[in-house]
Image: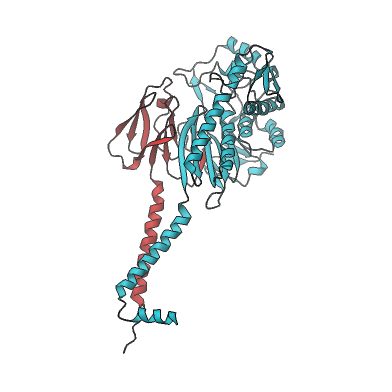
Chain colours: A red, B cyan
Amino acid sequence: MEKRKLVNKYDIIFIGCITIITALFFAFNNTFGNKKVAVIEKDGVEINRIDLSKVENSYLINIDSKYPAVILVEKNKISFLEASCPDKICKKMGKISQPNQTAICLPAKITIRIDGKTNEIDGITG
Amino acid sequence: MRALKLHRIFLSNKFPRTTFFLISIILIVSVLLFINKINNHEKSFTNTTTAMGTFVNQTISAESPESIAINVSKEITDLENLISWRIKGSDIEKVNIAPALEWVSVTEKTINILCAALNTAKMTNGAFEPAILPVSILWDFSADTPKVPNENELKKAVSNVGHSNLEIDKNSLKVRKLSPLSLVDLGAVGKGAACDTAIKEYEKSNAKSAIISVGGSIGVYGTKKDKSAFNIAIRDPLNTKNDAVSFATLKIYKGCVSTSGSYERNFNVDGKFYHHVLDTKTGYPTDNDLISTTVYNESGLLTDILSTACYVLGKEKSLPLLEYYNAEAIFVDKSKHVFVTKGLKDKLNITNQSYILCDLY
């Protein structure tokens, strides 16, 4: 009677393929962090998270607060469009598009930051 | 002989090959999942709040990072409510509105910050000046149409600037001013002091690692999960439009970093450039060769004080001061020359090659 082997050459190839595919899946998952994601927070509480790279048509987000603000979401960038705060500094901050950039409206306590790691930078001083 | 029996089961026809494959796949996937879990998914939380006239961005790795972040942002707001001259009822407002010679009771936090600021003011002969409000109030860099203050008004204001008009009684937590027109503005140090407050809280709440940015002042704490250094980018002072572009990176394991630069708050009138780092002697923006100074130290308060002081002093005069405080610095001048003190030499990496590393000594 022919002895049956536990694994043959093809089994090893098959298992190898599965390993590579799963590894690739995780690698892909981890680089997912490189997307351009805008995070809108009011008083430190996240109220919106938008993948800016996937925005096709620009749209507006109204944020209710002591000083209501309108945020303009465009492909790869985001900005304060209208603000009812007294100083309007948030509007002057312009459109932000790079990871680690932040736009804020101090009176309304609304912040927008762009998430995503670039060159493994933990923070920017300046 | 159990192993042998198992071996037989595997080899027998009762054990279908598909089952064998399924088991292998599940094993591989779970091992990978497990590795992925320990490597990447320690609980980390990022949030952004506002305080000290800017944003407060924290990334914390801990068991319950959310509650730490909330505590820290509350503590920073509490600190702001003590040291901001703009806030009614703050310690500094009380000092500013009190009549001359009258002692004002303040909190220990405020006294400690005032003492540090006054100390540097004395050492720098007023190049760094906590009692600069008479001048700084005349400059509004965020106005719709910013104006250069009237020359005579500015001259008069400069004569009222001076830390020698402030007296501190550290033991009884009291402050008084000797001249009625003397006014305190701690705007140049609040962000650094906020970083210290945060680091203290991270320590207290046993965070694994954390990084806080209060505007451009940064504090780091703990050890990152991969045990690598924190990589801090330094903003490109000549790229005024995009605050996320850097010219260099600095690797640090602990402590704080603050930067002062002419690009931060400024305006142009009649072709002339005006920025917010004011020369306490003239009342006008500091006019030397520098465009950015970055200071590294354990204390955020000191980095904030020293980055302003060193910017005003210029690099040669800054060296004894930095040595005294055991602080390190990076200077950038208008010709894109970068000067770095000994302690940071191997930690700094210039990423924009148009900036040239030069010899400081």
Q: Is residue A27 left or right of residue B358?
A: left
Q: Position of residue B41 (x, y in %)?
A: 45, 52
Instruction: Tell me where residue B234 sits by quadrant.
Output: top right
- Taking the image as shown, residue B225 lies to the left or right of residue B281, namely left
Where B58 sits versus B153, above or below? below
In this image, A70 relative to B124: left or right?
left
Return the x and y of residue B221 as percentages of the image width and height: 57, 43
Residue furthest to the left in view is A57
Residue depicted at 35% across the width and 81% down the height = B11
- Residue B164 seen in this snapshot: yes
| Front one among B301 and B145 | B301
Foreground of the two, A115 or B145: A115
Asked which quadrant contains residue A52, the reply is top left
Residue located at (60% from left, 44% from top) = B254
Q: Does residue B10 sit above or below B277 in this rendering?
A: below
Residue A1: quarter of image:
bottom left
